Structure formats: C-alpha cells, structure tokens
Image (cartoon, rainbow, N blue to C red):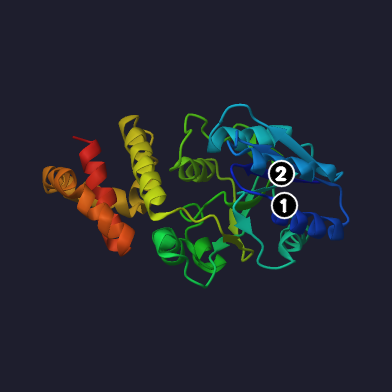
Amino acid sequence: MLSILLPSYQVDLTELVKHLLDQARVLAIPFELIIMDDATPVESVRQCNQLLAQEPEVTYLQQSENQGRSKIRNQLVETAQYPCLLIMDCDAGMVDDQYLARYWNYRESHPELPSRYVISGGLCYREEKPAKDKLLRWKYGVEREVRTAAERNEHPYRSFTPFNIFTTKETFLDNGFDESFTAYGYEDTLWGYQLRQKEIPMIHIDNPLYHDGLDTNEAFLAKTRQAVENLYRLMQEERVPDEFRQDSRLLRTYRNFQQKGLLPICRWYYKMFRQTMEASLKHAPSLKLLDSYKLFYLAFMSC
C-alpha cells in the first residue's frame, strides 16, 4: 500500500535505505522502495546504491541523462505501484525510528482525508555547526526553514517543501511538478501554490528529517542565483501566483524598490560589488546580506 520514492544524485543511500526498510517492515504492510538515480557521475556511488536492489522490496532505476528535480519526481510517481506515496530527498537523515509510523498512523487515524492531499513532516538540521565552508547553507536552513507544524500550518502552502512529504498517487493526477524546471529553485513553490489553487489540502505535522546534504557556501550561492533566475523567468512569463507575490519577502521588496525608482541603483550595486558581497557571504555568512544579494541580482536580471 506504500511506495517510498527516492530520487538519487551523488549520495550513498545505504544508511537511509536500511532505516526505511527496518521501519517499513515493522508496519507490516505491502510496500516498495524505488530509487531512481538521476545520472550520478560518480561510479562508486552508483554501485553502492545498485547493491541495495538485492533487498526484495527495493527497485533501482538508472537514468542515462540528468532529468532534473521536477521530472525525476514525476517519473518516480508514475513508476509507483501503490496508492500511498512517501517522497523524500536523498540527502535526508533519520531523526528516530518512528518516522514512517507517524505518517502511517496519521493517515489511519484520519479517515476523513480526501483522495488528494499532502502531509508535510518538515525538516531540521544537526545542532553542531558544520565547517566554515558550509556555514551559509546551515545558517539559512536553521533560521529560515525550520518551523514547527503549528507554525507551518498558519500558512501551509507558503511553508511547503517536497523534501519530506506523504501523499497519494491520485494527488499527482494533473498536478505534477513543472518539468520545464530542470535546475534548482521555485519548482516546489510553484507546485505548492498549484495545490492551493485546486484546494488540495496541505497538512503539516511534526515528523522532520535531518537535511544533511549541506552545500558549500560557493555552491549555495550558485543555487541562489539559479533560483533568482527561475523566479525572473516566472515573472517574465506572468506565471507568479498572486498569493506568492504577497507571501514572498523578495518580491515584496522588489516591488517596493520598483515603485520608488530604486532598481537602477540595485543593478549598479550588483555589477560593482558582486564579488565583494560573495566573498563576505562565504567568509562571514549573513542572511541580511544574502537577502540584499538576491534583490540586487533580481534587479540586475530585469535590466
């Protein structure tokens, strides 16, 4: 009755899959675990994950070319044989041994759930600080992403991330991830607001996973720029949901600066001080500076 779906890219899944298999077997329900590798370039990582298919419940699928974050999730859903789906990111870590049981027990204790819904468990970060070259991503996650279920339920679609969700295969009928997004940034935001428009319930519970795959400061800045580029593309295509315009701090600030005629100054500042800002963010991470960096880059993109 449960399909556990793991998109994989450059991560050894041995420990995570062991925990998932142990917990799923305790539930004593029919289940499968599908790993779909998105063309990982490191042969040793692929080989480790291929060995996991020796377990009877595990299927390993190898992509010859990189599909991107959206398409590979859609393909996993299409491959799943059971109606209930658990979708996780491959760089997740278990907090305890009750992770699957919490989701399953919530489903069993809420028979009023419709056939289409999403339950989000949230995410958390290790308490110990990482090395300095990964501190920016950790700080952003701890201060901006970690929220209790009560906090996330105040604005359920705004707080959405597909990092850790329990849903149904029917939810994806006419509601797949936008496959035109092949790189990092806003594909999950767009999907969340798509569910909101179709009045598909988004329920948050306290069932987090550790986000262990911390990018280096340099890699996170590159992903940040990619996300801003995706956002600018949505703006150009007039595909930004009205609700998101109100919810997004970046878009609210951008609009305020636009109305005051300050965007040219932001563009100039980005052109003149990009390297200085990036150097500062890499060596002394500041979320306020990161917010400014995103605003200045969005203004630069729009010139």
Earlier sequence position, callout 1 versus callout 2:
1
Q: Residue furthest top?
A: 64
- 88 or 285, nearer to the observer: 285
Q: Residue furthest front?
A: 44
Left or right of 137 in this view: 167: right
Tell me whether the residue at label 1 lies in contact with that at label 2, contact meaning CB atoms closer than 8 angstroms.
Answer: yes
Classify 50 as above or below 93: above
Q: State the mark number for residue 14.
A: 1
Left or right of 184 in this view: 274: left
Residue at left offset 85%, top offset 56%? 25
Q: Helix, strand or loop at disc 1?
A: helix
Mark 2 surroundings within 10 Å by alpha-carbon count, few (fewer than 14), some (14 through 19), many (20 or more): many
Residue 83 placement (x, y as % from top left): 76, 42
User: Would you name the residue on which mark 2 appears?
Assistant: 49
Q: Is residue 83 in sight in this rendering?
A: no
- 285 or 251, nearer to the observer: 285
Left or right of 173 in this view: 27: right
Tell me which amino acid carries mark 2.
Asn
Q: Is residue 180 in sight in this rendering?
A: yes
Tell me which amino acid carries mark 1.
Thr
Residue 59 placement (x, y as % from top left): 78, 39
Residue at left offset 48%, top offset 29%? 180
Q: Helix, strand or loop at disc 2?
A: helix
Residue at left offset 36%, top offset 40%? 231
Left or right of 66 in this view: 189: left
Q: CA distance from mark 1 to mark 2?
A: 7 Å
